[in-house]
Image (cartoon, rainbow, N blue to C red):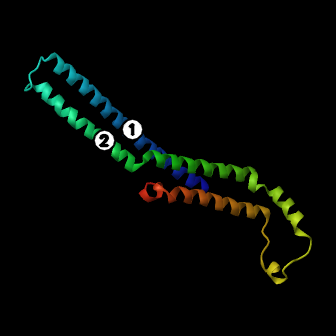
Amino acid sequence: SAWARHLVLKRSAAYFHRRATVMMIANALIMLATAAVAVIYSECSAVDRYSDDAFPLYHLRLAIIILPIAAALVGTIRSQLRYKEMWSNCEMGATLIVSEIYQYRARVNEYDVLAAKVDDDDGGGGGKKGGDKAAAAPVKSPSARAREKFVEKVQFWWDDVLEGDVGTTGAVR
């Protein structure tokens, strides 16, 4: 059902949002630590309280090399996993499905049954056209046509989300 699809997309959006937030915070903390270690190292070197063989200065030099590498690694992982983009796609899809649900329930826009009846009355002309072909095709009520449009639109938004990165990861369940 449409509500079930909406909930799946919302749950996936929450999952991707949590992951994107954790990756962003990790990257920010590593960058902050890199800057702090660089400042501490420069202060320790300027004061020259420690010799080159001293314990803190050696470890600070090592941290100055390792922390930027770790920041680049986290940044690369973050850009490859694309959690932020997948979060926004799931959130957009869920919102569009809810929009379609309420438009259908309120019978507005293309789901307006009264407008469909007026269009049918204007274009009918009163006579049968096409002979047996017109008689063979069942005439659907405006409510049935509105329901078909609704199902098609929800399926379109669902497929649109799954055709992107979200569908290839297998994270939507």
The image shows residue 145, relative to residue 73, as above or below, that is below
Q: Nearer the viewer, mark 2 or mark 1?
A: 2
| Residue indicated by mark 1 | 24
- For the question of whether residue 135 can be seen, the reply is yes
Residue at x 45% of width, y 44% of height: 84
What's under tag 1, amino acid-wise?
Answer: Met
Please say if 28 is above or below 112: above
Examine the rendering and report whether any part of residue 107 can be seen. no
Identify the residue at image location x=62%, y=57%: 154
Q: Amino acid at mark 2?
A: Ala
* Residue at the disc numbered 2: 72
Marked residue nearer the N-terminal end (2 or 1):
1
On the image, the x and y values in percent for residue 118 come to: 86, 59
Q: In the rendering, at what x and y percent does residue 92 appear?
A: 56, 48
Q: Position of residue 23 (x, y in %)?
A: 37, 40
Viewer-nearest residue: 92 or 142: 92
Mark 2: give few (<14), some (14-19) or many (20+) Cα within 10 Å. Answer: some
* Nearest to the observer: residue 146 or residue 160: 160
Farthest residue in the right direction? 126
Q: Foreground: 88 or 13? A: 88
Number of residues whose C-alpha sits closer than 10 Å to that of mark 1, classed few (under 14), some (14–19) or many (20 or more): some
* Number of numbered discs overlaid on the protein picture: 2
**Spatial distance from mark 2 to mark 1, Cα to Cα?**
12 Å
Helix, strand or loop at label 2? It is: helix
